[in-house]
Amino acid sequence: MRTTRRAFLGGGAATVSTALLATPALAQAKARVVVLGGGFAGASCARELHRAEPGLVVTLVEENLTYTACPFSNSVIAGLRDIAAQRFGYEALRAQGVAVAQDRARAVDPQRRLVSLGSGASLDYDRLVLAPGIGFRWGALPGYDEAAAALVPHAWKAGEQTLLLRRQLEAMADGGSVVISAPANPYRCPPGPYERASLIAYYLKTNKPRSKLIVLDAKENFSKQRLFQAAWQQLYPGLLEWVSLSNGGKVTRVDPATRTLVTDFATYKADVANVIPPQRAGSIAETAGVADQTGWCPIDPITFESRLQANIHVIGDAAIAGAMPKSAFAANAEAKVCAAAVAALLRGEAPSAPKLINNCYSLVAPDYGISVAGVYHPVNGQLADVEGAGGLSPADAPPDFRALEARYAEGWFRTITAETFG
Ligand SMILES: Cc1cc2nc3c(=O)[nH]c(=O)nc-3n(C[C@H](O)[C@H](O)[C@H](O)COP(=O)(O)OP(=O)(O)OC[C@H]3O[C@@H](n4cnc5c(N)ncnc54)[C@H](O)[C@@H]3O)c2cc1C
């Protein structure tokens, strides 16, 4: 049922921007939505928009022909999985009627509502959804720039970097030392560095047992910490060491040529080093004027519309989504909420306040999974935890429970990739 403007204004619309009051674009011929970025957020959003409003012209702009997924890429690094299992194309989306432009978005003009593409073409829009993922703050950690990543991989965007780290681990002699540098919050996938440490430790234990792994951390605490640390004690005693911020874990300088990581307390010379650098929203967010001084994008938690530019929505890792973590699960949930909100706005209706879910699995070993779940809703203009909802895997679960969670993790990956790209 359509909501009249009067009903809408009376319906608690105080948190929604005045841009809503414009003439409903769907009342005009063929409203156009451009979705920029074909990852878990953007590809899901384009699909959902098309499903919700087949009359819309939805164009997904993605620079790569194939998407390489980060979830489960730590298993590739540990030699437990082929990178081919991480790759997904856009044929199914095209077949369903979403136009996919393989091109790099170069600029966004919010006044003219125009996206300029690397090919020289441009796309105009009624609403733009930005889902560019993350960019790296090259140089924010002295010594670690784009060139350094060719020697000391970050492997925080899956693909060549994942394979480079894998090859370095394979080439390392038994008895070598691996050092991982984990960043301060916020960053993509809060439990990701610790899953990576776990699976590298598994590789070392089973292939190069005289080796050592050190995680240098710019934080005092991390996601699922008690579960990870209990598992490390059980599975990798003496092999994996975690150094917190207060114990000198913050890396202050990197020398990529010698694979040396320097902290205020000590100098670590690694045989294989993995630096996960400080991050920000993908660079097009800044170009479009939707990133604030933090480098991330403030949004309205009901519509995911930018707080800085009207008619531009930001979802996925690039957005400041309050208590929600930067995960593929969250990106997919945000995409669905945003698609419903954009469709409603284009119809001239008021979007309803959402509830969003996140559920992140991590593997500590191939048959040892742990998870964290949360439910979120808008409170005072931010996405906040729903009190009493969500939770962690039990601390004292038996091995078959951990094995079951490892299987659930795989099931989750199959489902979300089928839903996003299938
Ligand atoms: C090691 C690791 C493990 C992880 N494990 C999990 C997990 O188990 N579960 C989980 O939920 N999450 C996990 N994540 C997090 C997850 O990968 C991200 O949160 C998710 O990919 C975010 O989706 P997104 O769509 O916002 O960004 P992305 O997936 O990065 O997609 C962004 C897309 O935008 C495109 N793009 C960017 N700029 C432009 C431009 N200017 N023009 C055209 N295209 C552009 C990029 O090419 C890319 O395809 C993990 C991450 C890492 C690094």
Image: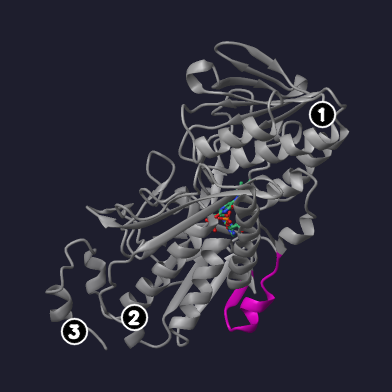
| Label 1 residue SS | loop
Q: Residue at x 17, y 80 (%)?
A: 5
Please state which of the two labelled residues, at mark 2 or mark 1, is closer to the viewer. 1
| Label 1 near ligand 1 (CB < 8 Å) | no
Quadrant location of the C terminus in the rendered image: bottom right
Q: Pointer 2: what residue?
A: 25
Which of the 4 image quarters holds residue 118?
bottom right
Q: Amino acid at mark 3?
A: Thr
Cα–Cα span, label 2 and label 1: 63 Å
Which of the 4 image quarters holds residue 206?
top right
Please state which of the two labelled residues, at mark 3 or mark 2, is closer to the viewer. 3
Q: Residue at x 53, y 75 (%)?
A: 47
> Is residue 178 shown left or right of residue 28?
right
Q: Amino acid at mark 2?
A: Ala
> Is residue 165 shown left or right of residue 47?
right
Q: Which is more toward the observer, 380 or 257?
A: 380
Work out whether mark 2 precedes mark 1 in sequence or the reverse, and give the earlier one: 2
The x and y percentages for residue 191 are: 55, 42
Work out whether mark 3 precedes mark 2 in sequence or the reverse, and give the earlier one: 3
> Is residue 48 shown left or right of residue 367?
left
Is there a contact, CB below 8 Å, between mark 1 and mark 3? no
Q: Pointer 3: what residue?
A: 4
- Label total for image: 3
Q: Which is more toward the observer, 133 or 173?
A: 173
Is there a contact, CB below 8 Å, between mark 2 and mark 1? no
Q: Which mark is residue 209?
A: 1
Specify start and end residues of the magenta stretch as a single range: 88-101
Quadrant location of the N terminus in the rendered image: bottom left
